[in-house]
Image (cartoon, grey):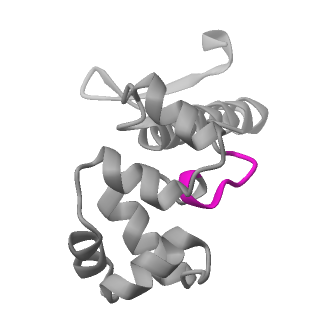
């Protein structure tokens, strides 16, 4: 590659390099690929940040047995319904109804609950991407 590059010197030192366009396009493509890989690595690290939590077998069994996910995670985190309700901006009665399955929380409410319980929304909703499904 270096044999195709023409250097322009100034005061005895190479200051500019003239590169054939095909070489330039190849260099740009390599730089873009490297940036894409860096961005992908960063996204993967952010995705998995905090996902190294070990959950006790009894919690996993409760979730697999079909117990209400909000209730299981709330109890595991040592929160009362009132504390979770306050964090989610709803009433204790609303949390109770969600845990009984008589009411579903809005998406915003469930996000607030997931954030407070330090779990993914999929962990509460039981979506396909959940680690337990």
Figure quadrant of the C terminus: top right
Residue 35 appears in the figure: no
Question: Does residue 10 appear anywhere in the picture?
Answer: yes
Q: Quadrant of the N terminus?
A: top right
Quadrant in which residue 86 is drawn: bottom left
The answer to whether residue 6 is left or right of residue 49 is right
Please name the residue shown 72% across and 31% down the image: 26
Camera-nearest residue between 30 and 94: 94
Residue 90, percent across and down? 34, 88
- The spot of residue 28 in percent (x, y) is 64, 39
Image spot of residue 70 (x, y percent): 47, 60
Q: Residue at x 24, y 27 (%)?
A: 11
Taking the image as shown, residue 6 lies to the left or right of residue 59, namely right
Above or below: residue 5 compared with residue 32? above
Q: Which segment did they paint magenta?
A: 123-129
Residue 49 position (above or below residue 104): above
**Above or below, comparing residue 129 to residue 89 in the picture:** above
Left or right: 78 as drawn, with respect to 117? left
Q: Residue at x 74, y 39 (%)?
A: 21
């Amino acid at each position: 590659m270096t044999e195709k590059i023409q250097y322009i010197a100034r005061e005895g030192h190479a200051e500019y390099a003239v590169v054939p366009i095909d070489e330039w396009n190849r260099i740009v493509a390599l730089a873009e690929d490297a940036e894409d890989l860096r961005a992908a690595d960063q996204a993967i690290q952010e995705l998995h940040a905090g996902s190294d939590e070990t959950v006790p077998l009894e919690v996993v069994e409760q979730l697999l047995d079909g117990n209400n996910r909000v209730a299981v995670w709330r109890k595991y985190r040592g929160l009362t319904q009132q504390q979770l309700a306050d964090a989610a901006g709803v009433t204790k009665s609303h949390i109770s109804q969600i845990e009984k399955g008589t009411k579903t929380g809005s998406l915003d409410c469930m996000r607030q609950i997931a954030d407070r319980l330090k779990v993914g929304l999929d962990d509460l909703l039981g979506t396909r991407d959940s680690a337990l499904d």
